[in-house]
Amino acid sequence: MASTAQRGTWGSKAGFILAASGSAVGLGNIWGFPTQVGQGGGAVFVLIYLACVLFICLPIMVAELVMGRRAQLDPVGSFTLIRPASSWWLVGMLGVLAGAGILSFYSVIAGWSVAYIWYAATGAVTGDADAIGAFFGNFTANGPLSVGLALLVLATTATVLLGGVQSGIERVTKLMMPALIALLLILAIRAATLPGAAEGLTYYLRPDFSRLLDPSVLNAALGQAFFSLSLGMGAMLTYGSYLSKHESIITAALWVVALDTSMALLAGFIIFPSGFSIEGFDPSASGPGLIFAVLPRLFATLPGGQLFGAAFFILLTMAALTSTISLLEVPVAHFIDAHQWTRRKAVLLVTTGVFLLAIPSALGNGAVGVFSRLPGIGVDFLTLMATIWNNFALPVGGLLTAVFVGWVWRVDQAIEEVELHGAPFPARRLWSVLIRYVCPAAISVIIVYAVVSL
Ligand code: PHE
């Protein structure tokens, strides 16, 4: 078992909050959330999403951070330490696999964002909606290019992890987050004044309650909430394991959830008004290309649009990188803690494995037919990966974590860890009820409902 000194701890509380929100804020907010809202019928998805964040994910965020800080180990080690000689370590293992699985398709989309820095800066993406859509289609159809870009993202992530996370990441995130928020605000204001903006805002804000009980919408909202908050796979548990015993877990959890949710909502205020200002725009038909098709049009309406566009994709890439770092850190921490690998060996081997798994996702958009329409399933490989991990693996991981903390480890142990050194735990009764009853029940109902209606 690696000692605490070897594992390292966060430099400061602000450093931890920034790193954890850096993990949470990423493609999930700016690319994933608007895409899901588009496919899930608009405002009703937003409402369900917010309910999932508040009543299911926030309590689980606290649970993961508490477990990590108590055990000071990777997910597998944490479950084992708290309940030795049981099968609970398998939940941690599911997280380790999810980290690699999610990173494999996430790095492909992050790679697209890298390429769009160049395209936006050079003004390559112009014309009407069809032309911009076709540009994205041609770009992603170039499989080898997507593979190369994903490799670039993975190699950069690996380099950061090799050097240790703290000084690099804490410093970069501190500069990046305010810049990203400021740019998103400017874009949202511009988007609100475009022709057609009102229609977009109506779509985004006025719920069509007929879809409230649609099992696929409920499932997608739950999965998206877990994904966006980096929950259900031990990323927050791992980050919590580097947290000092003197910091308040509750304030940290509230900060991360608030920041992540406002960034997602803000992205919607940009995409939908801009989208609806384009003639013939259909949010439900756009799929993964939504932001790559809509945003270049928005930049074209701005003075200095090329500059804005490039700045936007730079920030998006950086937001993605702080997330890829946490995704890779989960399996890496596991091999260091459980198998005493050196950090270097763990980083190199895990990154190679993830890269091999990323190839079919990168080739899925046309270059290799079999990956773009999987036989018998009918979707491309990237979409399949995203659905398996986000909609099922993460909620199931969250469900098992809630059951573990609520019933196996037991809430009084967790509360004791939160309240170490006199840190307050407001609403701890409410938290106990949510983690023991509401989270397990709600997640099981949604998952079962989604599976039977497949
Ligand atoms: N939360 C990240 C995002 O929104 C993705 C992520 C998921 C990161 C799970 C770590 C763990 O982009």
Image (cartoon, helix red, strand yellow):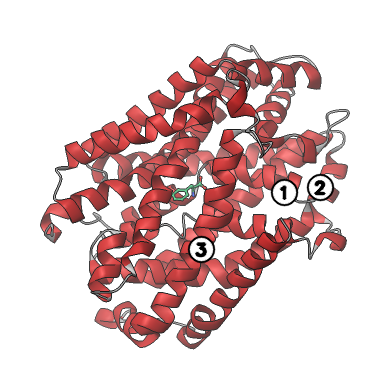
Question: Pointers 3 and 2 in contact (CB under 8 A)?
Answer: no
Query: Ligand 1 within 8 A of label 1's CB?
Result: no
**Is 371 on the left or on the right of 378, as rendered?**
left
Q: Earlier in the sequence, mark 1 or mark 3?
A: 1
Q: Percent position (x, y) of residue 336?
A: 19, 49
Of the 4 image quadrants, the one containing the C terminus is bottom right
Q: Which mark is residue 69?
A: none
Residue type highlighted by circle 2? Leu
As rendered, which of 334 and 283 lies closer to the eye?
A: 334
How far, Cα to Cα, is label 1 from label 3? 22 Å
Is residue 304 visible from the viewing direction of this image? no
Q: Residue at x 44, y 66 (%)?
A: 253
As rendered, which of 76 and 9 lies closer to the eye?
A: 76
Q: Residue at x 50, y 48 (%)?
A: 25
Q: Residue at x 38, y 30 (%)?
A: 355
Q: Residues within 10 Å of mark 2 (few under 14, many from 20)?
A: many
**Residue that label 2 marks:** 201
Q: Earlier in the sequence, mark 2 or mark 1?
A: 1
**31 shown above or below 69:** above
Q: Percent position (x, y) of residue 445?
A: 65, 72
Q: Secondary structure at mark 3?
A: helix
